[in-house]
Image: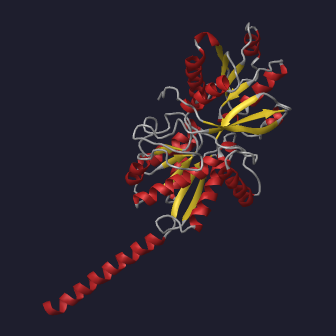
């Protein structure tokens, strides 16, 4: 009987082992899932629409080259509805669909929820362009990264460019504190401006809320300044940022306005007809005139794939996030969150579409990468050039 049982047991082991190999082989051939938990509707959607569509383009390009670890990539989506409270639910939706990396909204406040639930599972979360330094180890956790140039770099860049390239010698600030991005952006501008131009060159600051129907009192205080500032650092985003800008111009405040990526794109320009004198930093022009050929090439492919240009220049960070993550997975030889994180944290001036990218174990964003500075004159956008801050402002978590 024993002689009869041994072959049966062996046959069972062989069958079980073969079944295990079969399951493993099938798993190795399954697509790798990337989940996009982003704003597909609501007022944040213009900032996420371009990046998630550019991410689809990057996936297409990578798949045509053979995929990642020999496997194809597919994307699944969940809508945060531009609601901070809904971000975590959207993150869970894509994780439940098997996401092994999560792309989240281009903002710390609106992308943090989805990134946090991915982080809790040890899964890499990439924001396309959250620029507040809290998006990373300190505010989310060790598996959260962003393709932005952080606000310490963006604010410093606009201070340096305004002083060195435009010849401005005095500055004022209007800050919309609705989201952390704008608070951090203006803080960084102020610090770097005073370092360059001196304390007396900074003429003051005021605040308004994005949903304020009127900024009449802020305009009155600004117009009472004597002398008037050479430039205003304007930290806000549409729709409120556009409405306030319209009120400023209607009141005869024609002072040049400096801003960050929040005021990028032309989807809101109808609110301020024939606007002139706005300058902002962005990841690349969406008007085909960026000084970098690789940016214009991706724009052409984006238009071919999606039938039109993106709403904002944040589009390029969506492409770069997928590109950067895929490179790290290949270098790690694994999808394991810790293995991929260690590779990402080793990056020093790693090439990417949006420029040389550096991460450290303490900081999961770049702060001295170059950006394109755009201008709006007579209601039309054009690229001025690509500039890099020589020194970032202090990083405040």
Quarter location, residue 153: top right
- Provide residue 122's location: percent of width, then percent of height: 40, 50
Position of residue 24 in the picture relative to residue 321 (left or right) = left
Quarter location, residue 251: top right
Q: Quadrant of the N terminus?
A: bottom left
- Asked if residue 186 is positioned above or below residue 383 in the image, the reply reads above
Residue 335 seen in this snapshot: no
Position of residue 102 in the picture relative to residue 50 (left or right) = left
Quarter location, residue 42: top right
Q: Residue at x 43, y 35 (%)?
A: 138
Q: Nearer the viewer, residue 252 or 33?
A: 252
- Provide residue 172's location: percent of width, then percent of height: 67, 17
In the picture as drawn, the residue positioned furthest to the left comes out as 2
- Provide residue 75's location: percent of width, then percent of height: 58, 59
- Asked if residue 56 is positioned above or below residue 288 in the image, the reply reads below
Q: Residue at x 45, y 42 (%)?
A: 359
- Provide residue 137's location: percent of width, then percent of height: 43, 38
- Asked if residue 372 is positioned above or below residue 3 in the image, the reply reads above
Q: Nearer the viewer, residue 37 or 133?
A: 133
Q: Residue at x 39, y 78 (%)?
A: 22
């Amino acid at each position: 009987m024993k002689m009869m049982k041994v072959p049966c047991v062996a046959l069972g082991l062989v069958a079980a082992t073969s079944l295990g190999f079969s399951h493993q082989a099938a798993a190795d051939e399954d697509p790798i899932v990337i989940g996009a938990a982003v704003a597909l509707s609501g007022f944040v959607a213009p900032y996420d629409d371009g990046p998630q569509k550019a991410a689809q383009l990057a996936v297409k390009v990578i798949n045509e080259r053979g995929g990642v670890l020999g496997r194809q990539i597919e994307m699944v989506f969940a809508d945060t509805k531009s609601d901070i409270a809904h971000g975590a639910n959207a993150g869970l939706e894509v994780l439940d669909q098997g996401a092994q990396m999560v792309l989240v909204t281009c903002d710390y406040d609106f992308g943090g929820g989805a990134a946090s639930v991915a982080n809790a599972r040890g899964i890499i979360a990439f924001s396309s362009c959250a620029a507040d330094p809290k998006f990373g180890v300190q505010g989310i956790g060790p598996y959260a990264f962003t393709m932005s140039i952080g606000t310490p770099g963006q604010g410093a860049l606009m201070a340096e460019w305004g002083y060195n390239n435009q010849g401005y010698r005095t500055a004022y600030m209007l800050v919309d504190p609705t989201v952390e991005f704008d608070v951090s952006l203006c803080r960084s501008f102020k610090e770097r401006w005073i370092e360059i131009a001196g304390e007396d060159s900074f003429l003051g600051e005021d605040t308004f809320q994005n949903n304020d129907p009127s900024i009449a009192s802020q305009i009155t205080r600004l117009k009472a300044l004597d002398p008037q500032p050479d430039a205003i650092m304007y930290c806000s985003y549409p729709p409120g940022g556009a409405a306030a800008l319209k009120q400023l111009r209607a009141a005869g405040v024609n002072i040049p306005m400096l801003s960050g990526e929040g005021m990028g794109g032309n989807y809101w320009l109808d609110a301020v007809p024939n606007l002139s004198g706005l300058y902002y930093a962005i990841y690349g022009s969406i008007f085909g005139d960026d000084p970098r050929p690789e940016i214009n090439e991706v724009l052409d492919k984006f238009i071919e794939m999606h039938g039109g240009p993106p709403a904002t220049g944040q589009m390029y960070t969506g492409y770069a996030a997928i590109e950067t993550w895929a490179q790290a997975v290949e270098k790690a030889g694994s999808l394991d969150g810790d293995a991929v994180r260690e590779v990402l944290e080793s990056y020093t001036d790693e090439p990417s579409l949006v420029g040389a990218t550096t991460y450290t174990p303490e900081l999961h964003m770049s702060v001295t990468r170059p950006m394109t500075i755009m201008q709006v004159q007579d209601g039309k956008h054009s690229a001025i050039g690509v500039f890099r801050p020589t020194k970032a402002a202090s990083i405040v978590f």
